[in-house]
Amino acid sequence: MYTQKIFGAKDMLLWTRFELYKFIIIATIEVLIFNLSDGIVQIPFTPVALVGTAVAFIIGFQSNSAYGRIWEARQIWGSIVNSSRTFGMKTKDFINNEHA
């Protein structure tokens, strides 16, 4: 998972080119069927809207869970840093020139 790097449109097109090709082919077939049938074959809006809403919810939940994992990792890393700083200070205070 990338959290700090920003990717450009060229990178996204490079990564998703195969899915983009499939989408273009499917969309072209659907448009040809609609135009060749003079509008008799149509896709109703209700199933498309339901699937779109479901996909929006799924993506939203995935984004929230990814943010939660990042936040949890950040908290764990902060606790590791605090513990190592505390250990370093205690070690520095415990060892002096008398014990060296």
Image (cartoon, rainbow, N blue to C red):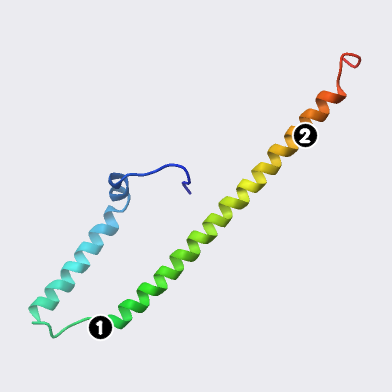
- Look at the picture and state if 100 lies above or below 53: above
Q: CA distance from mark 2 to mark 1?
A: 64 Å
Amino acid at pointer 1: Pro
Secondary structure found at label 1: loop
Near-viewer residue (75 or 22)? 75
Asked if residue 31 lies left or right of residue 98, the reply is left
Asked if residue 81 lies left or right of residue 42, the reply is right
Amino acid at pointer 2: Thr
- Look at the picture and state if 88 lies above or below 44: above
* Residue sitting at x 81%, y 24%: 92
Residue 21: quarter of image: bottom left
- Look at the picture and state if 57 lies above or below 43: above
Asked if residue 88 lies left or right of residue 19, the reply is right
* Residue sitting at x 16%, y 70%: 29
Among all residues in the image, which is located at the extreme right?
Answer: 98
In the rendered image, residue 56, in percent from the top left (x then y), is placed at 41, 68
Reading the image, the residue beneath label 1 is 44
User: Which quadrant of the figure contains the C terminus?
Assistant: top right
Residue 69: quarter of image: bottom right
Reading the image, the residue beneath label 2 is 86
In the rendered image, residue 37, in percent from the top left (x then y), is placed at 10, 82
